[in-house]
Amino acid sequence: MSSRNRRRDGGHRGGDRGQATVLGAVLVLGMVITGTALVVTLGATALTDTQSTSELERAENSMTLFNTRTSMVALGNSPSQSVSFGNGGGKIESLPDSGWMRVTHNDFNGSDDEVMFNKTLGAVVYRNDDTEIAYQGGGVWRKSDSGHGLMVSPPEFHYRGATLTLPIVRVASKDSGSGGVTATISRDSETRRVFPNETGPTTGTPEIGAPYNGTDSPYENPVANGTVNVTVQSRYYQGWADYFRQRTEGNVKEFPSDNRVRVTLVSLAGSVGEFEMPAVGNSVPVRGLGDDHPLNTYEISLQPDPHYNNMHWSMYADNGNEQFELHFYSSGQCTGSGYNGDIDMSIYYYNTSGSVNIHEEWQNTSVNVENNDDFDLNCSTGELSVDLLSDTTMYMGNISLTGSDNKWMFGPEIKDRGVANETQSFTFHNYTTTPQIDHGNYETNDPEELGFLINHYFDLLGPQFDLTVTDGPGGSSRVDEDASSGELDFDTASGAEYITFLHVTENEVNVTFD
């Protein structure tokens, strides 16, 4: 190959290197430009996200302050308060029709329900992108369009020691603003007492407010019978539900299809105390009975009609799968020398609610009222007084039915079932006395104190049941219930699912933005 050709070839390779240098510079410049654009884009996105987060945090802090100052206006003595929401973005609105609350006393008379309050709550809502911070019902809530409603600060729902205090704060005005605004809170009306209360609205179907529908009974404490339900419909119902679960042990049920939650608290009216004996077929309601043998006093005073001879008289409870009967029979009457017979007393208990049926029967056929201070029969007045928490001895075994089966509430069941002669056990109910006594197992004819048995079976029947009176069939009555009485005192149940006292008020505020 000639030198000319070699030079020509060499010159060609040098041109390639020059082009490659230029191409490399272009690629580097392109990468720099692309990288710069990417950094600018990502930085702008991060800056936007940071700015949005910062605005939401400021809004959350401002809404928490708004909550505090709204309470000062609605529940305090301040006529008005103001809160600045800074210079951020987003939109803020007061919405009087956002959400509602309903307070109901279910089964207030054993069967009917009473709507005590049912109105809108309203809300003040700050929105930024897909997230909102809201004030509603005295609480602050946070929610994204697809997220779970979260509580930022708790609502005005205060539960302590079976007392529910519920100052309902309602937003009554409609207004809006954006950017940096100042919210002004002012009272819309005076506080209205909902419960307790003697009188209230007289219009509406059904009537909402005191007195109880169809009665002249005012709303008064302690709350007796049934349950109290608080229902909230809200975009933030999940946050309300979380708070109800934290604050109470009531039954909390969510209804996601309409953004609703309900908490149910069982009424706990306390001990019965002294009572007039109910007529035959009527009952003494026992509500909120405590655990661990809670009875302190259980006494009855019976008046004859006209005498006790051939008396069949019971107090019983029938809870469907649980039956209890406390039965008295008398074979004697008062004479010039006193009462000439004995009292026959029986206890029957049957329970099918567990995996094994429980069936126990106890009887003492010869309680002598002349030498038993806990059974006092005064022949001058005819009054029979019985201390049912006494140490009178009862014996385990099949009850010997006196008279026909229909003179007992559960006579046919007692006759047909029969208690087996094998050992009976109380192990299904753990209870020990101090000093400890073994109440674990019993065989036929084993003794036990009347007071222990009554406490034991009431404990099993509780926390709520009805003690119903029966006085033999047809015209065989031997007790004048109108002249008879009793006393039942017990320790009430403890637990955050009960309610004894209820305090509800309605408080309205207006919110405007400048």
Image (cartoon, rainbow, N blue to C red):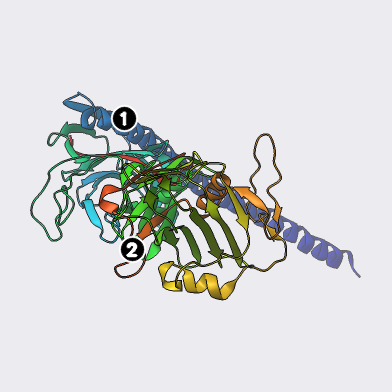
Q: Is residue 150 visible?
A: no
Q: In the image, residue 93 lies at what x, y percent? A: 23, 45
Residue type at the position of mark 1: Thr
- When asked about the image quadrant of residue 193, the answer is top left
* Image position of 334 with respect to 157: above or below: below
82 left or right of 10? left
Which residue in the protein does label 1 denote? 68
| Residue 107 or residue 246, whichever sits in front | 107
Residue found 15% across the figure and 43% down from its top: 173
Which residue in the protein does label 2 denote? 258
Residue type at the position of mark 2: Asp
Residue found 80% across the figure and 65% down from its top: 8
Q: In the image, residue 375 lies at what x, y percent? A: 46, 44
| Residue 378 or residue 413, whichever sits in front | 378
Q: In the image, residue 484 lies at what x, y percent? A: 31, 48
Residue found 53% across the figure and 47% down from its top: 455
Q: CA distance from mark 1 to mark 2?
A: 29 Å
* Image position of 54 with respect to 3: above or below: above
